[in-house]
Image (tube, rainbow, N blue to C red):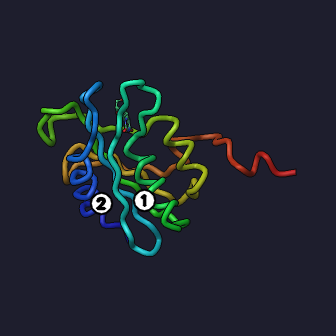
Amino acid sequence: MINQKLLIEKAYEAQKFSYAPYSKFNVGAALLCADGTIYTGCNIENAAYTPTNCAERTAFFKAISEGQKDFVAIAIVGHKSGTEVGKGNYCAPCAVCRQVMAEFCDLESFKVIIAKDYDDYLEYTLGELIPLAFTGKDLED
Ligand code: THU
């Protein structure tokens, strides 16, 4: 069972820590693990631009670096700073983050929840967001 509302609340909490002085686009994510643990993340930008890490990957890397392997769902919120909650758009994960998700998550069962308010969200399976994913299976003999 996924408590979407709780996951979205955690994503909004994490968004507060977003470090985005260049884009001024603040993103928060909350990743639910199979054991019930939730890891949060925010985007972390850099003056050199390319070292920037998205909120989703921050959450994944925190979880994986603490031994988590089984993931159920991720909630994502993002909008320009100063935008009121509910006034922005849905923030879909970038292609790099989708690829990272595909490395660790089941395409059919892992859910991606993109919210623009606490109770206004869209829910997709990862497979819907990354059709024909290139994964470790493609590298098998
Ligand atoms: N960003 C994320 O953190 N996640 C997304 O899903 C989309 C983009 C960040 C990266 C960068 O700091 C800012 O949003 C603008 O691209």
The residue sitting at 28% across, 46% down in the picture is 115
Q: Secondary structure at mark 2?
A: helix
Q: Residues within 10 Å of mark 1 (few under 14, many from 20)?
A: many
Q: Which residue is mark 1?
A: 73
Residue type at mark 2?
Leu
Label of residue 123 in the image: none
Compared with 74, 98 (above or below) is above
Q: Residues within 10 Å of mark 2 (few under 14, many from 20)?
A: many
Q: Which residue is mark 2?
A: 7
User: Which of the 4 quarters of the picture holds residue 37?
Assistant: bottom left
Place of residue 98 in the rendered image (x, y in percent of width and height, measured from the top left): 51, 42
Which residue in the rendered view is the most extreme toward the front?
47
Establish whether ligand 1 lies closer than 8 Å to the Cβ of label 2: no
Residue type at mark 1?
Ala
Disc 2 to disc 1: CB gap under 8 Å: yes
The residue sitting at 35% across, 39% down in the picture is 44
The residue sitting at 27% across, 42% down in the picture is 18
Name the quarter where the N terminus is drawn. bottom left
